[in-house]
Amino acid sequence: MKYGIVAFPSKELQDRANTYRKRYDAHYALIPPHMTILGPFTLEGKEMKEAAAELLEVAAKQKPFELKVMRASTFAPITNAIYLKIEPNDEILGLREALSLDFIKNIENHQYVPHITIAQKMSDGEHDDIIGQVKMDNFGHTETIDRVHLLYQLEDGPWTVYETFTLSGDE
């Protein structure tokens, strides 16, 4: 089974992202707009309940973080994905590192870039047609994220929340 840890932005930012996702994101119906912190991954040697308990303990020690959307960008030419670029900060990167526990077998094969995907799995022509328009949209937005979510993927594709972890900074 695939798992992931994500942060869901405010409804305001999700609504803005969904104006593009409805039309250009093949995963629109599978998961709401989100910033992936870890994923996808499998659990090795742990049951879901046990893993969630350990993740809860680690997450509680982490502080809330600022999610600052800078602009739209693209992963082209590697992939035709368009995303809202999130300014990396010590809290996001520290949270990701802290949650990378030994039993999590991460199957990502690329450098971590904090972002919210708004378009993916498009043809080259479709990507080229909309990237300019998306880059002109002013996505400047800042908010504080104080919780993250452990998700799992259902057999038919959608992702669902297993547990929510509050980031309280309790040492």
Image: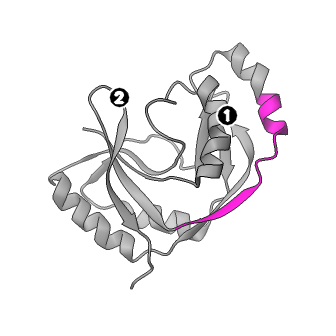
Percent of width and height locating residue 135: 80, 37
Residue 140 magenta: yes
Q: Quadrant of the C terminus?
A: bottom left
Give the SS element for disc 1: helix
**Tally of marks:** 2
Percent of width and height locating residue 118: 62, 35
Question: What numbered label is drawn on residue 19?
Answer: 1
Percent of width and height locating residue 56: 30, 67
Here the colouring is one colour
The structure residue drawn at horizontal position 65% and vertical position 51%, both measured from the top left corner, is 12
The span picked out in magenta is 131-145
Q: Earlier in the sequence, mark 1 or mark 2?
A: 1
> Where 151 sits versus 132, above or below?
below
> Where 156 sits versus 143, above or below?
above
Q: Amino acid at mark 2?
A: Gly
Residue 136 relative to residue 148: left or right? right
How far, Cα to Cα, is label 1 from label 2? 22 Å
Question: What numbered label is drawn on residue 157?
Answer: 2
What crowding class fits label 2: few (fewer than 14 Cα within 10 Å), some (14-19), or many (20 or more)?
few
The structure residue drawn at horizontal position 19% and vertical position 52%, both measured from the top left corner, is 48
